Image (spheres, coloured by chain):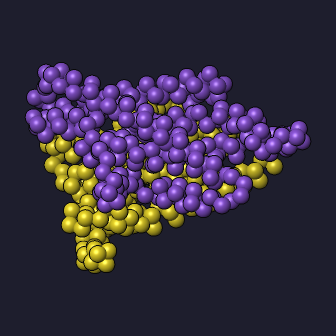
Chain colours: A purple, B yellow
Amino acid sequence: MLGNFSFRVIVETLPDFGYGLLATLWLSAIAFVGALAVGIIACAMKLQRPRLLHAPAVVFVDAIRATPLLAQLYFLYFGLPRLGIVLPERLVGVLALSLNSGAYVAEIIRAGILSIPRGQVEAGISSGMTYAQRMRFVILPQAFRVTIPPLLGQAIVLVKDSALLSLIAVAELTRAGQLLASDRFMPAEAFLTTAACYLVLYYGLKGLAALSMFRLGLQPAR
Amino acid sequence: MIWQQLQSIASSYPLALRGLGTTVAVSLIGLLAGSLLGFAMGMLRAGGYRLVSSAIGAWVDLIRGTPFLVQIFLVFFILPEFGIELDAFSASVIALSNLAACFICEIVAGGIGAVPRGQVEAALASGLSRWHQMRHVVLPQAMRIILPPLVGQYVLLIKDSSVVSAIGLTDLTRVGWLVVQRVPNGLLVFAIVGVGYFVVCYPLIALARRLESLMSAAHVEVQL
């Protein structure tokens, strides 16, 4: 039983968890910006007219989506030094997260663009707009609106995925829990506190997603 | 150099096969148990009992709001405190089944909720019991909506099973980790590990895509 559950230890190590929480938030934020960049590039490569760069983008997205993040993380962590690229663990982690989420972001953006009715494109063509103008003034503004909720969903997934960075010894929330668990052998206190911290982030982001859907006039998900 | 490393990697194929076996076993049991539990939870969640529905919803939210890695640690380290001694394999299966059940529950509940209300009323008017309404009227129609995201979810869960390597279970990812200590070529080793997952996951991704286009085509047909 959890008879000797010690709240005192949790209070004592609260600064560590606070630091871990901030690190998780910070790493996830950078990784999400990276994922947006990767996603936009991959999506543009998939949709562009001369289909030259189509195949590499498809291979990238499918390879990422069909393999686990942990294997991708180890691939970079153990593989990059082999190429003579030695990066700090944190950077390797952010890179892996960006590439992984980037593939999903690419699919989200693509679905958003393809959801725009064909008539909108035709109206643009008959108004004499070029391809770039149609993208800029007709398609993207409308696609933006429908991609925001799934993008926020992906952000939630990314925050949870960032827990895997603890396995390559990046100091973040789960790592704080692991350290407490191994130092004082108090796994219950350690991992329940860790889970509670993630729930704070989860409900915060979920609230943000609901708010954004409300502001965009989309149906909030229950 | 590369040739020697390849030979060295090839010589650890018994380990790799064991890892693949573990990954398949954990995923298969987890998905099977998770599906059964998830469908049951989904039906209850979509059902009329407010209290049951919100209790399940709260549990699903707790599981969806925390990383799978933390859940595995919780199962592996905390259940023994309640007198349930677990080895790494059972802890992994329990954690994965629970995760699968929670995600599948939301998919199933969403599918059931999308079946038009008139269908339920017609079934009720025909004198079908609650179970028969669900079994013969609601679920067959809901399956059309449930199936594509369900297969997609299976892919995510198979990939999530790689996290069980963190508690020392020798699955495919853990084998890669072990081999890379001996053969210092992370690119090669984890590319091979990636191929292992790819051959399982990619057909499922393709199936999910195919189902999605099939089901949406069928849906248009019905509406006409």
Q: Measured from the top left, where is residue A106 in percent x and y?
A: 57, 47
* Quarter of the rendering containing residue B18: bottom left
> From this viewpoint, is residue B214 visible?
no
Q: Residue at x 37, y 31 (%)?
A: A26
Figure quadrant of the N terminus of chain A: top left
* Quarter of the rendering containing residue A15: top left
Q: Residue at x 38, y 39 (%)?
A: A160
Image side of residue A31 versus residue B203, left or right: left
Location of residue B32 with respect to B44 vertically, above or below? below
Q: Residue at x 22, y 51 (%)?
A: B167
Figure quadrant of the C terminus of chain A: top right
> From this viewpoint, is residue A195 visible?
yes
Q: Measured from the top left, where is residue A215 in percent x and y?
A: 62, 21
Location of residue B103 with respect to B10 vertically, above or below? above
Q: Measured from the top left, where is residue A164 in percent x and y?
A: 32, 45
Q: Nearer the viewer, residue B76 or A15?
A: A15
Q: Residue at x 36, y 26 (%)?
A: A200
Image side of residue A160 versus residue A219, left or right: left
Q: Measured from the top left, where is residue B131 in percent x and y?
A: 53, 45
